[in-house]
Image (tube, coloured by chain):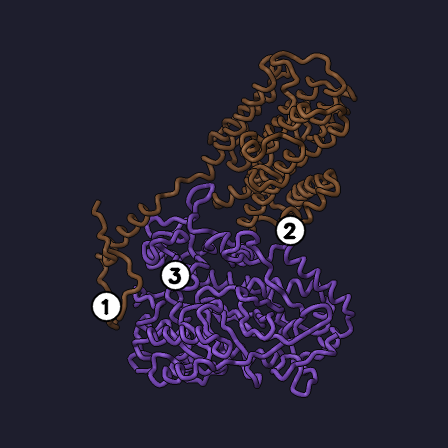
Chain colours: A brown, B purple
Amino acid sequence: MLSRVANCLYWMSRYVERAENIARIVDVNLQLLLDLRNLDEKRLEEHWLPIVQTTGDEELFFQLHKQARGKLVTEFLVFQMENPNSIITSICQARENARMVRDQITLEYWEELNRLYWFMRTSQGRQAWKESPTDFFQQIKGSSLLLMGLSRATSIRNEGWYFSEAGKFLERADKTSRILDVRYMTLPEKGVPGAITQAEALEWSAILRSCSGWDAYKSIHGAEVHPKLVVEFLLFNADFPRSVRFCVNELNVALRRISGVPEGKFCNDAEKLAGRLVAEMQFSTIDEVFDQGLHGYLDQLQFKLNAIGGALFNAYIFQPFTNLEEEIMVQQEEQQQQQSGESRTPILCASARHDVHAGPDDGAPLPIR
Amino acid sequence: MLEHYDPAGFFDEMLDERAATRPHYRKFHQLFSAMTPEEFNSKRQSVDLAFLRQGVTFNVYGDSAGTEKIFPFDVLPRIISGSEWELLERGLVQRITALNLFLHDIYHEQKIIKDGVIPPFYILSGKHFRREFVNFNVPKDIYIHVCGTDLIRGKDGGWMVLEDNGRCPSGVSYVLENRRAMKRTFPQMFEQIGVRPVEHYPQELVKMLQHIAPAGVADPTIALLTPGAHNSAYFEHTYLARQMGIEIVEGRDLEVRDAHVFMRTTKGLRPVHVIYRRIDDDFLDPTVFRRDSLLGVPGLVHAYRAGNVSLANSIGTGIADDKVMYYFVPRMIKYYLDQEPLIPNVPTYLASEEADKKYILENLSQLVVKSANESGGYGMLMGPKATKEEIESFRGAIEKDPRNYIAQPMISLSRHPTHIEDDVFEGRHIDLRPYIICGEKTTIVPGGLTRVALRKGSLVVNSSQGGGSKDTWVLYGDE
């Protein structure tokens, strides 16, 4: 598979996953506000600012806007083209990547992604957003899930598939960890958090719902919401498909399918780092996380995920492009050597003009190396 | 519907001079008239929506906001009878055969020059004559592998060749997509009318590409070389690559080592044997042609000359696209095949011939003047519709560089009923671009791309100038 193609597939599914996750985050937080009373300016800012921070674009946000107000934050995360991680930008990027590898994806997948693109790019999207933000987000999530289903149901399981799987699960692991990070300010810096208020419980259940994890969580822990259990569930649950552990496992599987190297061995840094992280997720406890402090732990986790992404790029995608000028020189030299060996065939008609001519006649003498 | 349609004195594809439906349109006319305007409009809208959804679009240069547009599509199909098509087919095969013989000749023995059929000056001054390739043997001796020859019909309905596109003609994906859309929208019409299929084009194309693979390569790797996602025909490139099941590559995906071409894959470098290139000669290889080209591959021409990679189309076919060479094609047919051309040229005047030049300059306001190496409807003067300033600027240009200009009488292209709005149909001028594939044998998928000048009165059908397209139906029989 062409490296460029692998790269496009990887980013295509990463961006689709990103758009879905941002839709989840904004949606849940908008709904949460409906449950909270007596919100003043300061309280509102405390609510919205961490959400900007989850996507890692705080600095950009404050370049564009003065204050983290609800409207501005949602606009920034949903429709703002200047934000490289907004829903609209993610969808544009996903489609641009898909367009470059149009021959590698199925018609059904392309048509749906293209439909989503035009939904966002035309007034349709705005209109839906105005009428009901929840329905709007439902559309984005629904489309992303449809894309996932379509690719599962129609894609051949080749190298390209595993590159897009790798992109998807890396992105999801990263976003789940960022969603978890939203409420770290309300937790003690280190140590397991104690009892929480009802408002806080609402916030933590919002986190679960951001990840579509509310029902799964309830089936394990009942209706009691406690930060410790929520964090444990979203980090370490082996079976919930949006937990970090689950995603890292899938990422590891995809990487091994690409190279064919079995479990327990590795042939590049991406596999080494992914294998290491799998083991770590398997053999860590929630108490250790809180001993270290949740925010610090998540920070490191994101750093590790980034490192896997970088190593993947180096192993498969990044083949140093030769400097074009230098390459031209090398090729010309090679051709000259060949030509001096051949006897030049005379051109039958005297030429009237020289339009295009290679080699030293151009006026620039070739340097001798 | 269509009962108020008026051919307005033009040659009309559907109606004859007594306003009776021509035999090959009868079944269609009948079925179409049975539709209510509401039915028709809902079908028409669903086609447009489908095109947008599928991303059947072309990129518009110099437009950053909405860089993609759908190629306007008119649902009324253009119909050609079986026997008429067979005549056209013979004429096109004749023409492409002569052109390929001509290209071989001027890059080898140059007999046509020595025998005085074409003055040497015209060939040697051709902007796209690649003298570096004199005496070079192209794989299987095929120069033009894919040709898009533009055909028109004049006042009396007679067919003529307007121009040959022997470099990288585009548009064939619309032929395939238009057909798909029409089949989905009007399935019963296809059942009842009997239309020859076009869907085998990609198979024919890939067969040709396999045929020209370098000697000794049993299972060649074939790639389509595209300038990239920002090219106006990018949709077509990915479309064809997907249909053929071949790789689509950009220049930066390829690398030349020891005169062999490789592509960069996730598992290292892999050899490439045949390249269907959708990049002009000038941009193919910065070591040979334009040095500033970032689209090409350094060393590609070297690998080509060494016989390690085959290119379709070959380098140097642009000379056959030269509108001055067009003038000589009937002579080529006579010279190489000893036949009369089955499809004539449009009468043409060469500005570099004294008598012609005099005539052209005296009649600028009646003529269409074209520069020799422009395409897409650019670099053209439509005398009868031009302003005084435009005419004078062309007069100056012709006197300065007569080699670069030809002139033709203004042809009143045939017209076809075309949907305008609601239930209004009017005649619009059309042409036809069949796609000819030259491999082991010469293949033409029935019909081709019918382009339609959607602006009222306009004779320019190019997509960049407000043109649209129609599905082209070649019938099995004549009715």
Location of residue B49 (image quadrant) = bottom right
* Mark 2 → mark 1, Cα distance in angstroms: 56 Å
The answer to whether residue A17 shows anywhere in this view is: no
Image depth: mark 3 or mark 1 in front:
3
Per the rendering, the mark at residue A171 is none
Q: Residue at the location (52% across, 76% down)?
A: B151
Location of residue A41 (image quadrant) = top right
Residue that mark 1 sits on:
A346
Residue A152 horizontal/vertical position (percent):
65, 42
- Kindly identify which chain the residue marked by label 2 belongs to: A
Residue that mark 3 sits on:
B281
Of callouts 2 and 1, the N-terminal one: 2
* Mark 3 → mark 1, Cα distance in angstroms: 23 Å
Image depth: mark 2 or mark 1 in front:
2
- B320 on left or right of B447: left
Q: Are marks 2 and 3 in contact (CB under 8 Å)?
A: no
- Dot 3 alpha-carbon crowd within 10 angstroms: few under 14, some 14 to 19, many 20 or more: many
Q: Residue at the location (64% across, 44% down)?
A: A151
Q: Amino acid at mark 3?
A: Asp
Q: Residue at the location (55% across, 62% down)?
A: B203
- Dot 1 alpha-carbon crowd within 10 angstroms: few under 14, some 14 to 19, many 20 or more: few
Q: Secondary structure at mark 1?
A: loop
Position of residue B457 relative to residue A297, above or below, is below
Q: Are marks 2 and 1 in contact (CB under 8 Å)?
A: no
* Mark 2 → mark 3, Cα distance in angstroms: 34 Å
Q: Are marks 3 and 1 in contact (CB under 8 Å)?
A: no
Residue B348 horizontal/vertical position (percent):
43, 81
Position of residue B38 relative to residue B155, above or below, is above
Per the rendering, the mark at residue A111 is 2
Position of residue B30 relative to residue B279, above or below, is below
